[in-house]
C-alpha cells in the first residue's frame, strides 16, 4: 500500500508575523519557516503505518517555491521514503493545490492520502475535501483516531456531542486533527539520511498545466488592537459600568 502525504511550508507558528506596509501580504523576510503542524501529524500517521507493515511506501508532496524542499526533507527525516515538489512561484488557492495533487495522484496511484485538516497560515480547511471531490474518492475529515482494518480505513472523529466512527473503502482521503498523534522529533542522523533520499522536482506543466488562480488576495490587514481592561473597585461599580455600556 502506498500513502501520499501533502505538506506545506508555512511561517513557524511560534513566530509573530507582520503585514507589509503596502498591505500586499505577510512580511516573511528573515522569518523562520517550518512544516504546517497538521501536516506533521499526517506524516507521523503515515510513517507509523509503514513501520507497522501496513504500508510499503510513504511519499511526501508539496506545492510551492523551491524553498519548499526544506519541508519535504523534514518529512523524509521523520520517515517518508521520498518527496515530490511541484515547483511554482504563483500564489496557490486551495482548489489550485487540490488540482495539482489530483495530477500527482493520477501519476503515483496512492491507496490513501493523509493530509492535515488545514494550514495555519490561511486556515482554509478546504484542500483535503476538494481533492477527494476531484478524485471521486471517499473522505473522512478531522480524524482523531486512524487505523486500517481488512483493507478499509477506520476513522474516529470527535464531534460536539460525541464521537463518530467511519469505515472507508480505499483509495480514500483523510484529514488529520491535532489529537491524532504526537509527531516524533527529527533526529540529526535521520536528517542526514533524508538528504540522500530521492526528491523529485516537477513543473506544473509536466502534470498537465498549472491551474488558474481562482482566488486573488486583495489586501492584508492586522487584527485590531485589543483595548486594555479596566479594574473596578466594587461589584456596584462593575454593574454601573455594564449598565452604562448597555450590557445589562
Image: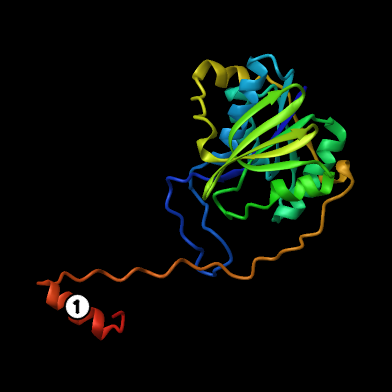
Q: What element carries label 1?
A: helix
Density class for disc 1 (Cα within 10 Å; few <14, some 14-19, many ≥20) is some
Residue at the image point whose x is 31% and y is 79% from the top: 247
- For the point 84% across and 45% down, the residue is 136
Tell me the residue that label 1 is attached to: 239
Q: Where is residue 111 in the image (x, y as percent from the top left)?
A: 79, 29
Residue name at image x 62 percent, y 30 percent:
146
For the residue pair 94 and 89, the one nearer the viewer reads as 94
Quarter placement of the N terminus:
top right
Q: Quadrant of the C terminus?
A: bottom left
Q: As drawn, is 120 to the left or to the right of 109?
A: left
State whether residue 70 appears in this view.
no
Residue sitting at the far right: 208
Seen at 89% across and 46% down, the residue is 208
Kindly give the residue lying farthest to the front in the view shown. Answer: 161
Which quadrant of the view contains residue 246? Answer: bottom left
Residue 4 seen in this snapshot: yes
Residue 77, horizontal then vertical, whole percent: 59, 23
* 134 w.r.t. 156: above or below: below
For residue 115, which quarter of the picture?
Answer: top right
Q: Residue 49 in the image: state x and y as whole percent.
A: 65, 21
| Lateral position of residue 247 relative to residue 221, left or right | left
- 84 vs 150: above or below: below
Amino acid at each position: 500500500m502506498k500513502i501520499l502525504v501533502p505538506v506545506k511550508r508555512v511561517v513557524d507558528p511560534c513566530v509573530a508575523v507582520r503585514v507589509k506596509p503596502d498591505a500586499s501580504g505577510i512580511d516573511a523576510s528573515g522569518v523562520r519557516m517550518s512544516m504546517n503542524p497538521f501536516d506533521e501529524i499526517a506524516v507521523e500517521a503515515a510513517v507509523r503505518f509503514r513501520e507497522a507493515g501496513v504500508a510499503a511506501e510513504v511519499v511526501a508532496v508539496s506545492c510551492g517555491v523551491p524553498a519548499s524542499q526544506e519541508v519535504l526533507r523534514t518529512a523524509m527525516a521523520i520517515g517518508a521514503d521520498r518527496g515530490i515538489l511541484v515547483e511554482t512561484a504563483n500564489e496557490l488557492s486551495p482548489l489550485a493545490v487540490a488540482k495539482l495533487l489530483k495530477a500527482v495522484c493520477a501519476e503515483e496511484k496512492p491507496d490513501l492520502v493523509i493530509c492535515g485538516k488545514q494550514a495555519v497560515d490561511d486556515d482554509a480547511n478546504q484542500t483535503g475535501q476538494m481533492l477527494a471531490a476531484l478524485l471521486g474518492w471517499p473522505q473522512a475529515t478531522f480524524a482523531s483516531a486512524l487505523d486500517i482494518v481488512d483493507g478499509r480505513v477506520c476513522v474516529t472523529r470527535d464531534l460536539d456531542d460525541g464521537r463518530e466512527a467511519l469505515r472507508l473503502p480505499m483509495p480514500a482521503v483523510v484529514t488529520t486533527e491535532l489529537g491524532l498523534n504526537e509527531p516524533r522529533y527529527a533526529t540529526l542522523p535521520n536528517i542526514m539520511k533524508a538528504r540522500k533520499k530521492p526528491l523529485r522536482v516537477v513543473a506544473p506543466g509536466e502534470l498537465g498545466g498549472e491551474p488558474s488562480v481562482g482566488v486573488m488576495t486583495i489586501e492584508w490587514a492586522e487584527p485590531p488592537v485589543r483595548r486594555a481592561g479596566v479594574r473596578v473597585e466594587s461589584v456596584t461599580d462593575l454593574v454601573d459600568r455594564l449598565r452604562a455600556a448597555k450590557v445589562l
